[in-house]
Structure formats: structure tokens, C-alpha cells
Image (cartoon, helix red, strand yellow):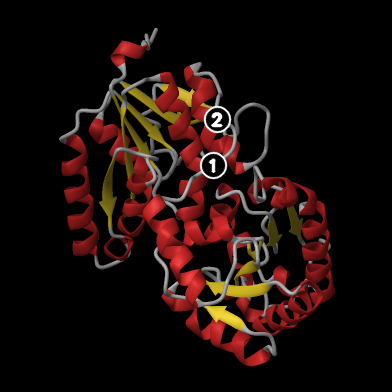
Amino acid sequence: MLQITRASVRSILILQTKFIGDIVLASTLAGNLQREYPGVNIVFLCEAALADFVVGHGIASEVVSFKRSHMRGTTLQRAREFVETVRRLRRHRFDMVIDLADSKTSRFIVGLINAPIRVGFSPSEKRLRWFERQPANVLAKPFGYGEQHYLYRYLSPLEALGVDLRVTVPSIAPLPQETARILALMEKSDLHRNGFVAVHAGANFPGRRWQPERFAAAIDQISRETALKVVLVGGPDESETAAKIMAGTSSPIVNLVGALSLKALLALFKEARLFVGNESGPMHMAAAAGTPVVGLFGLTSPVQWGPVGVPSISLQPSMPCDCVGGDLCRRTDPSKACCVWRLEVDTVVGAARELLAQTEAALGQAV
């Protein structure tokens, strides 16, 4: 029988090869492990663009990064990236590996590293084919603690290891230097703490993005009713969406799309009164910063992916969804379904109004 003691675990690798929202949720796993194994060196395997955020906020002490563009490139690029990544991982001689990615590639990496303690999911998210094997010697349930949210998928390894659950929701404090930069930027833009709504209109697939014209209409109505200003946020590849929203509104908007690092974005969310946006990584970042969230969902289930740890309202059109995406829509794939397009402006504005009213008293106490 595998014996695990605190003294035997000095270094842990967590394979989390997905996106920033997954990193935010997985930060709770890292926080619990840091408490269970004082002084442990936690290393994340993650996409290179996320490395600075992960290390800067103490989610991990180190990162071994890979470039997603290379892993999706030519056969030669993929092979080089894989070999180099494994080579860097093997230098560490990990005592424990936790495979949150749960993919064919991640399982292969776990087998090559061959740490004494190897944690994986059973059954895997995608059924293993006859020639695949699960290299883990500690098997975690698909979702731990009897819960359904993906947060508890990423916490499930703790249950399998017999580690006490102390950190139950993501909570990531902005770095002081980033807060200072954001406050200076807010002063230039005539923004005040708790005086603006952060809006994220992007997502990695068009069908998951609520229509720009509806965002514009909702922004105008929220601004008119509340006198709150609006700040648009997002990555550089979301500038076209931002331009459409700006063109469709009469309200003054501060457009910071493409202007902020992930660390600066977290600091901005901390100062916001409310977040309104599509189901995406920034939604989870806003919740981790402690900001109330109105999340817009399509086919993806809010039960599994809704914001956690803060007052929130998750909106989803009635199901089953009549297809509104035509050839773009893949109905059975939540990441490629257009159901969010069916949300009405009044529904989103009503949720924002309700959440602002709910959190008004707490805001007064904080001030």
C-alpha cells in the first residue's frame, strides 16, 4: 500500500494545461497542498502566457511552460515542444504529480516522469482506448466531495490523498504594484473604486459571445439607471468586438481591451463594483478578486462552470435551445454552441440591477 507522509512530499507537479479560468479554479488545489505540506515546492505545467500570473500570485513557486501554438503546429514543432517540456520536467525529480489535464498527452507525461505518487482521474473524462493506460497509482473521482462544479474536479485529488479541505473557493489578491498602476490608470480615466462595471464581451468561440449590439444596449441601460461607468476589458484579439460595442453605445466607455496584463486585469476587477460578461476565464478572475458577477452562459452548464465564492447571477436561456447559430453551431459541444445569443437585454440588465441591490449593504459596510 502506498504510504504518503508530509516528510516524503517536498515537490509537487500539477499538470494544468488549459486556460486562465482553469488556473484560477486550480489555485484552490495548490492552496490546500501548501497548507498540508509546509514548505513544499509546487510547480505548474501550464501555457507560457499564464506563467507570470501563476508565479506572481503565489499559486506555484515555479512554472514549466509550453507554447500552445507550437503544440498545435507542425509535427516537428509538436515533437520538439514535447521533448523539451519533458526534459525540463524530469530535472525536478518530483515526489508527487497531479494530472488535472486528464488527456492522452498528460498521461504520457506522467508516465515518463514516474514520480512515486501519481494522481489521476478514474474514470478519465474521455474513456481510455484499449492501447492507453492510466499511469496513476492514486485515483481521484471525476468530481470530489459529492459536488458537480468543476472546482470540485480540481479539488478531487485532495479527497483521494486524504488531505483536509481548507481552501474551498478561489481567492487571489492583486499584487500591490499592480493595484498602484491600476489606481493611477483609473485616476486618468476618471474612474473611482466601486464606481464602474467591468464588461468582458469576448470568448474563444463566436457562439459563446453575447452579441455586441446587445452588450451595447445593456451598457446604455445600466449606465443610465445606475450612473456607474463602464470599462471594457479583454485580450488584443477582442478589439473588433470592443469597437462594435463602442460604436453602438451612447454611454461613455473606457476601452482597455488589449491594454492590460492578466495581473493588471485582476487588480482592475478588485476595484470594480460589478462584472458582466460571457462565461470565460475573466469571469472566474473577477470572482476570485471578490467582485460580484453576472455571467452569461449558453449550452455550458452554470452548475458546473458558474462563478464561485462571490454574490453572482448566472444567466442561461431556456433549454433545449432552438438553434440560432446555423452552420456555426455544434449543438452537442458547449464550447461550440450559440445558445447565449438567445439571452435578452432586459434579462441581463435585470440581473445586474438585482445583484447591485443585493450587494449594496455589504458595500456600505466595506466603505
At 65% across and 82% down in the image, what residue appears?
212
Provide residue 252's location: percent of width, then percent of height.
Answer: 64, 84
Is residue 126 visible in this depiction of the protein?
A: no
Relative to 42, say whether 333 is above or below: below
Image coordinates of residue 51 in percent, x first then y, are 32, 52
* The label number, if any, that marks residue 167 in the structure image: 2
Q: Image check: 178 left or right of 167?
A: left
Note whether residue 353 is visible: yes
Estimate how packed mark 1 is, as few (under 14), some (14 to 19) or many (20 or more) residues with alpha carbons within 10 Å.
many
Residue plotted at (55% across, 68% down): 203
Q: Is residue 3 above or below residue 209?
A: above
Is 360 on the left or on the right of 309, as rendered?
Answer: right
State how far apart marks 2 and 1 are (Cα).
9 Å
Q: Which residue is mark 1?
A: 171
Residue 258, quarter of the rendered image: bottom left
Classify mark 2: helix, strand or loop: loop
> How many numbered discs, if any?
2
The dot on residue 27 is none
**What residue is shown at x 57% (from left), y 34% (from top)?**
142
Q: Is residue 217 above or below residue 301?
A: below
Q: Contact (CB < 8 A) between labels 2 and 1? A: yes
Q: Which residue is rendered at x = 48% and y = 82% of the image?
A: 239
Quadrant in the rendering for residue 325: bottom right
The answer to whether residue 294 is above or below residue 148 is below
Q: Amino acid at mark 2?
A: Val
Q: Position of residue 339 (x, y in %)?
A: 72, 69
Q: Secondary structure at mark 1?
A: loop
